[in-house]
Amino acid sequence: MRSKIVTGNWKMNKTAAQTEALLAELSGKLPDTEAEVMVAPAFVNLTAAVRNLESSTIEVIAQNMHFAESGAYTGEISADMLLSIGIDTVIIGHSERRAYFGETDEILAKKVVAALEKNMRVMFCFGEELEDRKSDKHFSLVESQLKNALFSLDANSWGKIILAYEPVWAIGTGETASPEQAQEMHAFIRKTILEAYGTSIANSVSILYGGSVKPANAEEIFSKPDVDGGLIGGASLVSDDFIAIIKAI
Ligand code: PEP
């Protein structure tokens, strides 16, 4: 059985005090759930978030990391730094990192390897732009993103990989992939993994959907057989909305 996961990506939002307040609200209202619940606050708020959630089942994860062990990379954060504050899951490949910070498949492949070498879990994000979908290139684009960043990994590494399919045209736009579009792509992703790594890995990797998931559409998206949860941006910044999405799974 693969894990169900709901993750809030807080991006560059919330001061220290606001982060603390939101965490308190979330842990106070968290429903009983079999799903893993994760939040990714900004780097400066991670240490406090880990402390604040010490007695909660909510996991604190990072939004990004660098591939180098250490060194002259001003403004960057290493795997060891994250591990040293109790964080062992990291988002890699978010479309905003790709679009605004020039992160290519090659860079992302290095980040994935660096995280896995430290035994971290990787939540790997990928997804097509609107033009790719309009020109019917979305399947081949997604396939190449997966292959370029992940398909050099050995089979054992896949136990540490969580996938998050996020069509770029649906992120922060209010436009969501229909549940059928999400299921169609998730089934394609699973088939692509099956062809490369076999049934057992394909059936055990969690594939999350991300892109304008809200309380109103979460249940229908999560009901699809190949959708194992969600990566939530905007709606995860409001405790009642994020809690409603967690309940939907
Ligand atoms: C995201 O940033 O990963 C995301 C899915 O954002 P939103 O839910 O706001 O579309």
Image (cartoon, grey):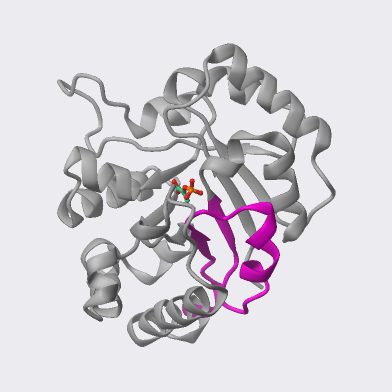
Residue at 58% x, 47% y: name it: 7
Of residues 121 and 7, the one drawn nearer to the viewer in this rendering: 7
- Quadrant of the frame with the C terminus: bottom right
Q: How many marks?
A: 0
- Quadrant of the frame with the N terminus: bottom right
Of residues 221 and 134, the one drawn nearer to the viewer in this rendering: 134
Q: Is residue 134 visible?
A: yes
Looking at the picture, does residue 28 appear above or below residue 109?
above
Pinpoint residue 54: horizontal percent, then vertical percent.
71, 26
Residue at 84% x, 49% y: name it: 32
Pinpoint residue 160: horizontal percent, then vertical percent.
47, 57
Looking at the picture, does residue 205 appear above or below residue 40?
below
**Residue range of the region highlighted in magenta in the rendering:** 202-231
Residue at 57% x, 71% y: name it: 227
- The residue sitting at the top extreme is 17
- The residue sitting at the front extreme is 174
Q: Give yes or no for residue 143 being in the magenta stretch.
A: no
Q: Give yes or no for residue 229 being in the magenta stretch.
A: yes
Pinpoint residue 209: horizontal percent, then vertical percent.
51, 62
Pinpoint residue 174: horizontal percent, then vertical percent.
49, 53
Q: Is residue 53 visible?
A: no
Q: Is residue 25 left or right of residue 152?
A: right
